[in-house]
Image: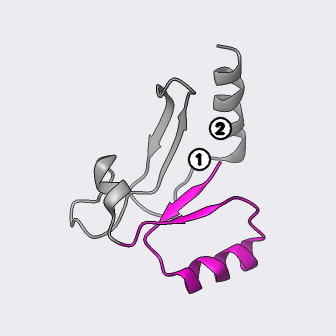
Amino acid sequence: MWAISPDSVERLEKMRTDEELKIPLLLDPELEATKALGLVNGKGDLPHPTTLIVEPDGVISYLRIDEGVVTRPSNDEVLDALRASAKK
């Protein structure tokens, strides 16, 4: 599990500390990964908040794209998707 963000190193480190995150935070300041995945918002300057599960063979088994940062999948929703993925 990891997160990709266009935010600065400083902002990501603050978020890591404030939220006590233990996952890797990857930088995408030019939105290269975001654009490659087709996850740029309509304005073209920010990514859509997205949660996805990618299988070892590259198949996406779970994808949720939200419009804003306030709406996110619950932990239970993501865990259920991971459990379903593990059963395959």
Q: Residue furthest top?
A: 88
Q: Do the CB atoms of the residues marked 1 and 2 lie less than 8 Å apart? A: yes
For the residue marked with disc 2, what is the amino acid?
A: Glu
Q: Residue furthest bottom?
A: 10
Q: Residue furthest front?
A: 57
Task: Specify the segment rendered in magenta.
Answer: 1-29
Query: Could you say where residue 73 lies in the image, as x and y percent from the top left?
Result: 59, 47
Q: Pointer 2: what residue?
A: 77
Residue 73 versus residue 60 in the image, above or below? below
Q: Residue at x 61, y 54 (%)?
A: 2
Query: Could you say where residue 39 lies in the image, as x and y percent from the top left?
Result: 33, 52
Q: Pointer 1: what residue?
A: 73
Q: Residue at x 38, y 57 (%)?
A: 48
24 or 16: nearer the viewer: 24
For the residue marked with disc 1, what is the amino acid?
A: Pro
Query: Could you say where residue 74 lies in the image, as x and y percent from the top left?
Result: 65, 47
Residue density around tag 2, few if under 14, some if 14–19, many if 20 or more, within 10 Å: few
